[in-house]
Every structure is written in C-alpha cells, then in structure tokens.
Amino acid sequence: MRTQRTWACKRHTLILPIFMLVLGLGCDNQYYDERLQMEVQQLDNDLENRWSTSGVVVLAITQNGPADKAQLEIGELISYVIAEYPIQSTRDFNTAMKKAMDEDNNLILYLKDKPPLRIATRRSGDKVGLKVEGNGTVRVKEIQHGTPAANTDIQVGDIVEKIVDERKIYSLGDYKKTLKEFSKQQVTFRTTELIGVKIAAVNALGNLGDVRAIEPLVALFKNSTELSLRKAAASSLERLVELSALNELFQQFQRANVDRLPADSLQAHQLEAAAILGLLTVDRAENMATLKAPFGTQFRHRSEALYQEINEGQLVELVQQYIQLDVEPEQEIRRACLAMLGVLKPTSAIDALITVLKNKTEIPGIRFQAGLALSHIGEPAVDELIAAFEGEDASTRDIAASALGSIGGTKARNRLIQALENANEPAIQLTLVDAIAKIGDATAMQALERQRERFQQDDSGIRIFLDEVFKSF
C-alpha cells in the first residue's frame, strides 16, 4: 500500500530492533541522512527485480530526531520525494515551474476550488504553456494553444495555490541529490511498506545465531498483525532452537579455539545436523570437520549464550500455547512450534502434545508432528502415548504406536507386542510391526518371528513386510 505524508507515518516498534541487529551484517549501500537523522539503504538488485519497484529503504532512525518525531516507519521503501512550493507571487510560480520541469518533466498544479492537475512535458525544456500574474493572489493570465496546459481544465483567472514536484527515487544517489535540491522546501515522502525487506531481516536473525535475536523475534511472533512476518519469526525461532541444540558440538571447537577438528572426534548426528544447517563441512577423506565462514566460525563464540537463553523455559511456555488449532489457525506456525518442542524435549509439554495428537479436526501432518515431538521427549511420554493408543481413533493409534516404537524400552515394547498379537486390521498390524522392528531387541524380534509363523501361509502385505523386516536384520 502506498502512502504519502510529511516524513511518512507510524514507526513499527517491533521491526526496529530487528533492523538494528541486521545492520551488524554491514552494507556498502547505506547513507545516514543528517537532515532527518535516519539511515537509509539502496534497494538491492534482487529485491528491485523481484517487486518491480525502486527506492531506498529506511533502516534505522535516531531517537528523538526529526524522522523519529514524525514517526517514520522502519522498513518502508521511499519511492518518491515530494516538495511543495506555495505560490504567492509570479516569481514563486516561475521558480517552482523551472525546478520541477527541469528535473522530472512533470508537476502537480493546485488551483483554488479545483482538483489537482498533473501536467507533463515530453522532455526537459519544453514549455508548459502557462503564464500568471499577481502578488499575494496569483492568477492564470494566459494559456498557450498546443501546449500541455491547453489540454487541461485550466482557465484564465484561476487562482494558483501551489505547485508540487514529485521526484521518483531510483537510487541512493537520486535520494541524496533530491534532498539537497529540496533543502529549503517542505518535503513529503511517498512510501511503500516493503514487506519483503522485513521478512529478509527476520530470516537473517535466524541465521545469525545471536542470543539478542530472541527477544525481538518473540515480540514479533506474539504481537504482529502481519501473518507473513509472524511466519518468518516462527521459522527463525525454530532455526535458533535447532542451532542451540548444537551447543555441545560447537563448544568443542570453542574450547580448542579452532575452526577445524577431526570428524571422528565429534558426534556423527550433530555433525550431520550442522552440515544440513550450512554451518560446517565434513571431509571424510581427510577426516576433518571445518566450520564455514561467516556464520559457522562466528557461532562457536555464540552457541553457549544462545543455548542458555533458549533452555530457560520461557520459549517452551510460549510455543506450546501455539500448537493448538483453536489458538493458532496458521498450520505453518503450529508446525514450527511443534518442531521446536521436539528439539527442546520439555516434559511440561506432554499433555499439550497429546491434545494435538488426539485432535480429530487437526490435519494429519500436524498430528504426526506432535507424535514425533513426543517420541523425542522419550520415556516420560510413554504412559500418555499408551493411553492415547488405547483410544478408538485409528489415526491416533497409528501415530502413538509409531512414537512408542521410536522411544523403545520395556514398557513400550511389551504394549506394542501385546497389541500386535491381538490386532486383526492390516493397517494397524503394519504400523505395529514397524514400531516393534524399530526397537529391535531380542524380545521384539522373537515377537515378530511368532507373527511371521502366524502368517506362514498368507501372501498378504503383513507377511511380505515381515519378510522384509527380517532381511534387514
């Protein structure tokens, strides 16, 4: 949505700390405007091409400066700078007309009791075709035939109130030049809230792995009315949680004060996770794990603080509220919150996760994600999962059985074996076989062998699946 106002509009307080943090990444195309006491950045080529627009983006505002007092909004795209020329004399008119037409070849003329008129010439130097007279009150004296003025609703005798000069901003150079030329005029901006720039900033915070990102992301997640920003905040928080889980790995690099370590001295699953997140590379031939610059090499200095903050418990309390369909309608956000609980493994979230698992109105993928989170919590969730398995809903039974198989242990194994021996429905039989095979201890395999003998003369899917299970052992 485009807006026009003096120094623009309301500042988005949730976005301010995000942009201030992202500024730490550095940029070669920034400019601090002394007049307005704000920092702007040229819209980079990728964003310009993507949104078919141009201008400069407001990145930071000095507290209590002119832009701050006028509530200019962080993240807006300044696409036009507009100057107003009040007309009180013939000289005012001629000066304003010359400045406007020399640079932009168009202007907006305000006549008393008439709508604003936009007048444009083909090129700089062409005549508008309008002459005025008077001081104090300036009136149209003459309209020349065949000129742009003759093709409008201007009449001799009309009172000229002001001329408005709109300058399209294509680059940081345009912005600086225009503000210099308009140094004595009242300036208005035409701005666009460029949501893509904000989303990029929010995503960048997830990549930084900096503990300072948590507070502004949480505030944005809880309070923003813009769904795309809330989704981006949830995604960035999810990444920060995933990063925090790698603290043990990165502390090994930190204690050794190096960016390379022998791969076989590190936990394989953490190495794989860090590689997927783009933080390091593993050379199996050389048996070396190397942190990637800049985020991987920087993160070893940040991981401990992030881990401590993430695991304090406040984030757990927040996200488990938003896994419920009646609280959060956006499934992408619910999925991100469930994924965070799966990494954090809080026992306090078991009841909330079971509620999601058993919710028949929830989409299957979200219910499965709840089961996955419960399987990561492990042994403390076994009793609740067994209780959920006892229900009549087939989907709940299926997901609960799979989660119990992932957790393993005597209690989960024995309940799954008992269920398989009494099950008659092929679908649940297959799920139970798969769950018991995950446990894979001697008792589990003996139970599956008994089932294979039970289906000895059967050519059904369950017998074929059992044969495949034993081939893999």
Image (cartoon, rainbow, N blue to C red):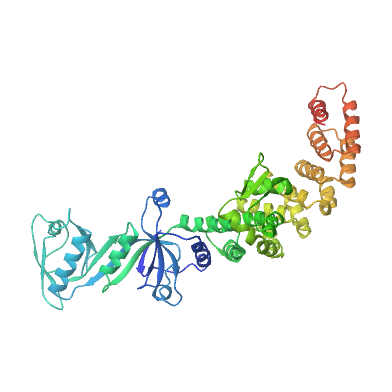
x and y percent of residue 329 in the render?
A: 61, 54
Count of marks overlaid on the render: 0
In the depicted view, which residue is nearer to us: 221 or 289? Answer: 289
Quadrant in the picture for the C terminus: top right
In the depicted view, which residue is nearer to us: 305 or 341? Answer: 305
Q: Does residue 221 show up? A: yes
x and y percent of residue 275 in the render?
A: 63, 46
User: In the picture provided, is 367 more to the left or to the right than 447?
Assistant: left
Q: In the displayed structure, would residue 36 be above or below residue 167?
A: below
Q: In the displayed structure, would residue 423 be above or below residue 132?
A: above
User: In the picture provided, is 332 more to the left or to the right than 106?
Assistant: right
x and y percent of residue 373 in the render?
A: 73, 50
Residue at point 78% right, 45% down? 403
x and y percent of residue 31 in the render?
A: 38, 65
Q: In the displayed structure, would residue 70 be above or below residue 284?
A: below
Residue at point 60% right, 48% down? 278
Quadrant in the picture for the N terminus: bottom left
User: In the picture provided, is 132 more to the left or to the right than 369?
Assistant: left
Residue 400 location, quadrant? top right
In the depicted view, which residue is nearer to us: 141 or 33? Answer: 33
Residue 397 location, quadrant? top right
Q: Does residue 361 show up? A: no
